[in-house]
Structure formats: structure tokens, C-alpha cells
Amino acid sequence: DQQVKQNSPSLSVQEGRISILNCDYTNSMFDYFLWYKKYPAEGPTFLISISSIKDKNEDGRFTVFLNKSAKHLSLHIVPSQPGDSAVYFCAASQSAYNQGGKLIFGQGTELSVKP
Amino acid sequence: SAVISQKPSRDICQRGTSLTIQCQVDSQVTMMFWYRQQPGQSLTLIATANQGSEATYESGFVIDKFPISRPNLTFSTLTVSNMSPEDSSIYLCSARQWGPSTDTQYFGPGTRLTVL
């Protein structure tokens, strides 16, 4: 049962343009969402998060949008840079402490930003 | 933010042997976890490392195969026991920090394990 899904395994974008990475979830109890970037041979690096009380969170070039009714979130990177080329994972959890804070990850989307 | 280090960074092991991976966090954290990322796959949670008590394992993972220790708030070990080639994977330590205005989970660099 894949509770968090990233349906696009790869995405190619021209430098300077917008990258949009999508993520869907099925568990309505999820109320906290995170995006991670992962380079080969490294651990995932935290990028940005959003709580279900918000529908948008912005940090520099990165913006995450949350549509709770559609159970969908997206990560926008503007402008895209070649250094953004990596695998991006979305993750979801129930943030309440007594739920254990377990993160459930999507399958990842490999972003390639071409100069 | 929390900085997480893991040892070893990689290893090549023989079938039937065991390997212990160490994880050190540079600050006290609320929770510590162990994940596995098999080739071409997503990150799968193995267990939550509980301080001073037995770890909480996810479905499909058992203590005899993946014994975990967490003697204090900043250190944990994962042992991969009686290894087979199917255990070849990247093993990742993770730590979560809660606060009044923060809730973030960090990852170590991973241990790349190859079992021959």
C-alpha cells in the first residue's frame, strides 16, 4: 500500500525555468509534509516542509503548495539551476508525538536541470 | 539543525557475517530512526530506536535480523545480522527534532553495504 506517491520518476528542465515536482498521498491523517533532495552517495537533505494548516510555504527559490482536498502537494523551484539536479523525495507524517513521527516516503523524482 | 555522522561509510561483507553501523548526532534529538534504501527504491523505515528500551520495528523487519541499540539521546547502532546478498543496500540513520516552532527530520550520509 503506497501511501505517498510520486508518479513521475524523472523530470528534465532547462536552466532558469521552473521545475514542478508532484506528490500525492492517500492517508488523510497525514498533516505534515517534507521535501528532501538527495545526491548520489549522500544522505537526503531537508529542503522545505509544510503543515496542513497552511497551503503554501516559501523558502528562497523553493515553494511547496499543499492541496488538502486533493491530497496533493507540489514543490516549485524557480529559477532552476544545474546544481538542483538530484533525486527529490516527498515525505509525509502524522506530526503528533504519540504517532511516533514516522515519515513515509514517495519513490522519488530525478530532476535534471540542463544548462 | 542536527548533524549526523555514520560509520562505516561503506563496507563489503561476506554472506553469513554481521555488520554494526554506528550513528552519532551532534545534539540531543527527540527520536532516532533507521532506514534502508535498496537500489532504485525509496526509503523504507526499518525501526524507531528508543532510548534505553527495545526498538520499535516496522512490518517486515525483526529484532533478530536488525538488532538496534540506543544507549543515550545522541547515539545509536544498527546491526545487520547473518547477511545475505539481499541485504545489499544503503542504511540511513535519521533523527527528528521537535520544538515549539520546529519539526524537522535529518539524515546521515548513509552506509553503503554490499554483501557477496
Image (cartoon, grey):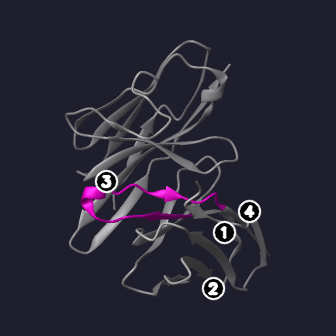
Quote the CA–CA distance across marks 2 and 3.
34 Å
Q: Position of residue A7 (x, y in %)?
A: 70, 66
- Which chain contains the residue that carries disc 1? A
Counting residues from the N terminus, which is met first, the one under dot 3 or under dot 4?
4
Distance of label 2 from label 4 (alpha carbons): 20 Å
Q: Residues within 10 Å of mark 4 (few under 14, many from 20)?
A: few
Position above or below: A39 against A32: above
The answer to whether B53 is drawn above or below residue A50 in the figure is: above
- For badge 1, the amino acid type reads Gly
Q: Residues within 10 Å of mark 2 (few under 14, many from 20)?
A: some
| Helix, strand or loop at mark 4 | loop
> How far is the residue under mark 1 from the one under mark 2?
13 Å
Q: Are marks 3 and 4 on the same chain?
A: yes
The residue wearing badge 1 is A83
Q: CA distance from mark 4 to mark 1?
A: 19 Å
Over which residues does the magenta segment extend? A90-108
Amino acid carrying mark 4 in the image: Pro
Q: Residue drawn 66% across and 69% down? A: A83
Task: Say which amino acid is labelled 2.
Answer: Val
Identify the mark nearer the N-term, 2 or 3: 2
**Mark in front: 2 vs 4:** 4
- Given residues B84 and B10, the one toward you in this image is B84
Q: What crowding class fits label 3: few (fewer than 14 Cα within 10 Å), some (14-19), or many (20 or more)?
A: few
| Residues marked 4 and 1 touching at CB (< 8 Å) | no
